[in-house]
Amino acid sequence: MSDTPLILPIENPVLKVSDLHLYYGDSEALHGISMGFPARQVTALIGPSGCGKSTLLRCLNRMNDLIEGVRVTGSLQLDDIEINDPALDVIGLRRRVGMVFQKSNPFPKSVYENVVYGLRIAGVGDRAVLDEAVEKSLRSAGLWDEVKDRLAESALGLSGGQMQRLCIARAIAVNPGIILMDEPCSALDPRSTARVEDLIVELRENYTIIIVTHNMQQAARVSDLTAFLYEGHLVEYGPTKRLFTKPLSPKTEDYITGRFG
Amino acid sequence: MTPRVFQRNRRWDRLARWLISVGGVGVIGCVAVMLLLIVWMALPLFGKPHATEVVPAFTAPAGTPILAVGLDDNAEVGFTLGGDGFFQFLELRTGAVTARVPASPRAGKPGVKLTGVSAGRHLEYALAWDDGSWSLVRIAFRSSFETGRRQILHQVEILAEMPAAVTMPAGGAGQMRAGEKGGAVLVWLDPSGATFQVRRSVVKTDLLGNEETAMATYEIPVPAGSVTAFTVDLAGSTLYAGTADARLLRWNLGDDRAELLEQVRAFEDGRRITALGLVFGDVSLAVGDDRGGVSTWMPVALYGEGSSRRMELIHTLAAHASPVVEFPFVQSGKQLLSRSAAGLVRLDHMTSERKLLTLQGSQSLDAINISNRGDHLLALDRNGLLHLWDLDAPHAEISWKVLFGKVWYENYDRPALVWQSSAANDDAEPKFSFVPLIFGSLKATFYALFFAVPLALMGAIYTSQFTTPEVRGVVKPAVEIMAAVPSVVIGFLAALWLAPRVETAITGVFLFALILPVAFLLTLALWMAIRNTRLAKRVGRGFEFLPLIPVLILAGAAALALGPAVEKLLFAGDFKLWLFHTAGLRYDQRNSLIIAFALGFAVVPVIFTMAEDALSNVPNNLKAASLALGASRWQTVWRVILPSASPGVFAAVIIGFGRAVGETMIVLMATGNTPILDASPFNGMRTLSANIAVEIPEAPAGGTLFRLLFLSAVLLFLLTSVLNTAAELIRHRLRKKYGQF
Amino acid sequence: MKPSTNIKSPGFWRLGEPFVWLTGAAMALVLILAGGMLVVVAGNGLGVFWPARLEQFEMKDKTVLLGAVTQRSAVRNGVAHSRLQVKVGNRDLSGADFRWIDADAVARTSAPPDALLVERREFGDFHGFLVRSATAGGVDGLRADWLRVRAEFAGVAELGKAVSKINDRMEGIRRDLLRLRYRNAPESGSAIRGCLARQAELKVEFDRLVAGQTRSLEGLRRHTATFRDAAGREKEIPLTDIVRFCQPNILGVGGKAGWYLEKVWELFFAEPREANTEGGLFPAIMGTVMMVFLMSLFSFPLGVVTAVYLREYARDGWLVRVVRIAVNNLAGIPSIVYGIFGLGFFIYGVGSGLDRLFFPERLPTPTFGTGGILWASLTLALLTVPVVIVATEEALGAIPAGVRHASLALGATKLQTLLRVLLPMASPGIMTGFILAMARAAGEVAPLMITGVVKLAPAMPLDGNFPFFHVDRKFMHLGFHIYDIGFQSPNVEAAKPMVYVTTLLLLFIVLLMSSSAILLRNRMKKRYTLGSF
């Protein structure tokens, strides 16, 4: 097994991270992460609280820009585009790299308007196109049957699980290649969690998904690859099954066996 | 801790809890007391007038039939005038007769009697003697302290005498007015009602000081119908007559002839005019008819017909049940006293058209007299009983219609909404319409918000959403400090610094409004050209306002520099003149533009701060969600942040509105405070709040104006209170809504 | 479904960047407005006391003017047309202090080195030249004379103080008499007789002092100096009328600075002169300070107690909501409504009641039944209560609940927790509220105008006579001073410099207070936000 690398190299990654350092003010939160994300796979980022997994995720669509005092060095490549380029058009980036947040955050608008939001801001006004997109996205998110009669109602009236799936539908509607998920199930009950997990597995057909989770079972259930981060370092990265059954690093082993975290 | 200490602590705690609760809830008390007090002060305006008999009715002095009664200002001394030509003075509280005074030396001679009396000015009587001669007498009262205690002294003054004339046999009705230096005019109506005779005596003094009385007599034929009532104004220069077929005629009484000014048909339904009287001030003519109707008429200027005027029906007051027989003279305000054939006496107010009091004795009232101040009324009924009433109608000129509706005031061409609380003469009609003041408040508020709302909201959006936290940390306190600038400072600068400068550079100000967008677009174009350079990218975000500051200042400077040239080009060098000639608008130095700016300056920080808070309080995850979907920062703000914060933003605008409506010093200083109804931006206005500040030093406590100012304070209180309560409720809901995020 | 690979975003306009810029422009404009106002006030107010160069304008029509240029206007009716506004002074000689002259009409301009600027007690400044003074030696001689006279004049002023003291005592006796007579004390009784005797005694003393004062003044007024104006007219000015003088055209920077400081000193510590348009602001400053102080006594406790009630004692419910709405209403009611409430409630209600109860002998002259500093302060106290409430509530709300729980868990009562833990912790926030309330009160004018402020108060609310703090007196106020001299002054142009100075002072005070309060609050906010992590 010694020939198995601690960090699995990915061929033709959609997204390639090299030597990524991130600083909050003076403190370094990510210490030179280098890894690739394969297309149409689910990659899980795991690790104890504060290990930098969410921070890493937010780097991928530059959501860290919203946090003051953040400084990033190193390279992040989406196809041939340098994400970290200060001159990059982040809006275009975010249209390609969608995101689902830990707490569901539907807009205080109707279900319908929530889903078409991304399309509307991109200037799509054709009702037929929007209707189609709504149905498609909601179906993909497995929500269509539940909300098809309530499209005009406020999204804030949905249950927690439904809201989260609505957020996923909203992210899908703009047709991104990559979806980032930041602990999408942490605020959900087990049933809703199961549905979202099923959804993730389904979405894998069409999308590259990167998911941050603190729930190792979840990572094991839904992901193809898993990366374990610890204190801002990428400790181990490999196929999920292997990582959970035969971790190479003692740190990883300690973590997945529940000795800390 | 010993139990005793423990207990003591508990006691203190309970006491403190009680005190603090009382204090806390006391704030409600403060607000309630404020509202109650100002309402309480304003309430008497709408009090019901009432009359009380001061003493039980008592028998009038016996003797000849009583033709007239009268009383002094304090309702202590009264008098009766008998058919024998004697005044009998009596103490009104006891009914005891104190003196009997002949009205003229002629009285008391055997066989001499009065055939008629007509009242003129207050306590002034034209006496018709049975020999055909006339006297004009006045009763004068004055207080004296000579004996140590106050005494009311009376005196009968003979103002004029008019010897008998063949053409005017005894009988027939006459009215007499005093002229200068003992001169007089007598207007006498032939018993047939077909002709008037006018006799005018003029006293002339020659160079040696000898007085000579010249007498002129002329006749006025009545064009048609027979005159059933007439009256002469106090100056003796205008004669009004009403006929049986309801026509009103008006003559100008010249020295030797009369000129018929007009005749109008007052009613078309077959009424007879039975009584005429002039309301104090000699502008309005009270007309009574045989159906009991009481109305007032006034000559109104006709458009396009030079100076000619025509009598118009101005006010219709409540009707009597029986024909009106008399309008006794009232010297207080625009009140109208009328007596009906049934002997009922009514007091109305002309301007407010309010029916104030109805008085009746044990029998029909025949002779009445109201005191100078209008607070007492003496009346004689057919049973020979004298009644003395204390009248209480303190704010008769106020009604809801006067406050909020159009009223046709004396000497106005049409009904109007006017605020004019004081005038030079006491016979002027006070004009108490709140409408121009409310209009002024709304106008000032509108112009101020027109300027302040876009500025404050956009500024708040930029500060809360687009700029960097560092800039925000500077701008927000700066704006909060701006909110602390005393309004007296703003008002002073607006009035004495800004207004004269804007007046000279008004074209430049308008030019600025044109140049600004152009400069802005040019800046944007320039920015588009360089925005893709790395430097611009790195520096640009959140600092857009920095390059804009010089742009704005330069645009302003350019506008001011170009102003004169443009003014010369477009407005022949003088905008104000041009404005007056082309649009007919006057340019006031302290106008609505200045107010918009000054009041806007005061309101901007209020709206800015609250809107900024509301926008910043929108949960960050909504912003994140939108941005993560590829929305631009503007799209995020426009589609997510603003809609979510809209109640808070709305509340900010409401609070700003409330602040602008109530602001006093700025409008007091930076407008001309003229209560006009004119929306032009080049005029000023008078607002409710400034009106209080302007008028309260002139308002005697307890008076109508004083109470009206409290009423306007009630209006302001309620208005701002509704606004603030609404804003608080909206914010409360907002807090609750975001509680779930 | 084919994921989009297009990363080129829609253009600048579609993204709404112009709107961002538009909002940026709005913020920039707000900043420019705020800054512009400060610049205007400071620009006009700071330079007032700096002695300006006196220029001599020889006009083409042979008239000569000596004055300082105060304004230039470049344009009139769209035509380039340079005009100058010149402060020529000499109101007693030429009628108007200020003149507009056409630049074209000036033949020659010079700055004569010996031009004198003489500040007088009456008729404003004198611009001209010294002709002669008692002591030879030109301006130095004049100065020597003037200093001597001024020293003597100070002695006469001391006499004036004695006169006013006697006057006060006579007023006291007059009141005693009124009271005695009102209570029907016998005219021949010892009380009234004693009063009358003392009154007569004081009257003699009073007359003697006044006569002495008049005599010395007359003597002093005989010391004069003769000046002439630019046109050559001579004017004899008594030295007692001269407040100060200098030759601005040859005065060095140090001298000018000295003049400036002297004027600033006068501003803060001297009485106003010439219908408030000259001299100092001392009574107005004192009046403002006393009023704010008195207001604080009422406003602060009520505000803090209400906030404590809302935050610590009340249970959430309709009552609290009503209280909150009441607080909001208090904050939003126009200040003039407070004023008219103060007039109706405090003055005509409470004040008249007090007069009837305690000072019936003075009626119909009101004591408390008229505007006074007490009523004005109470009115403003109501007006500023919401400011204190909001700040205190905010401060209490920022204290983490754990602190309360900890204290209560140790067996402290709620009151003890409040007094020993919460209020001390919240004190910076409460202070902020106090400062903001004081700033608000210092700048508010409208309600004061009808509750007791006057343009010239005969006596200050605080003086050396018992009971020292006279809450029934009328007072002067900086804000009202601005309104009064700016708008009610007969000579607006001459009053302007003083208005600007007063404005600058008021603005400085208010902005200093509020900015320190806001900075304090923001610093505190930061402390608690950091602390909550």
Image (cartoon, rainbow, N blue to C red):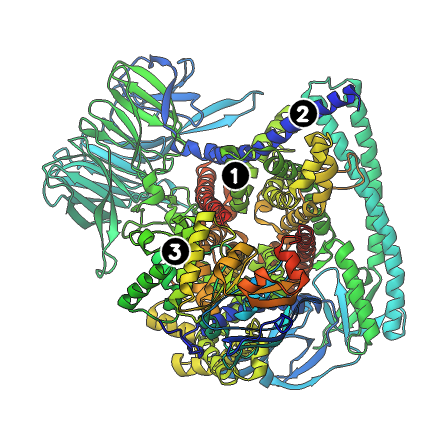
For disc 2, the marked residue is: B15
Gap between marks 2 and 1 measured at Cα: 24 Å
Report whether C533 appears left or right of B182. Answer: right
Give the crowd class for mark 1: few <14, some 14-19, many >=20 residues within 10 Å.
Answer: many
Is disc 2 on the same chain as disc 3? no
Residue B175 rendering spot, x and y as whole percentages = 26, 36
Q: Amino acid at mark 1?
A: Ala
Gap between marks 3 and 2 measured at Cα: 50 Å
Task: Identify which residue, B343 or B88, lies in the foreground.
Answer: B343
For disc 3, the marked residue is: A109
Mark 3 — on which chain does it sit?
A
Residue B286 rendering spot, x and y as whole percentages = 25, 38
Q: Nearer the viewer, mark 3 or mark 1?
A: 3
Report whether C292 appears left or right of C36. Answer: right
For disc 1, the marked residue is: C326
Figure quadrant of residue A112? bottom left
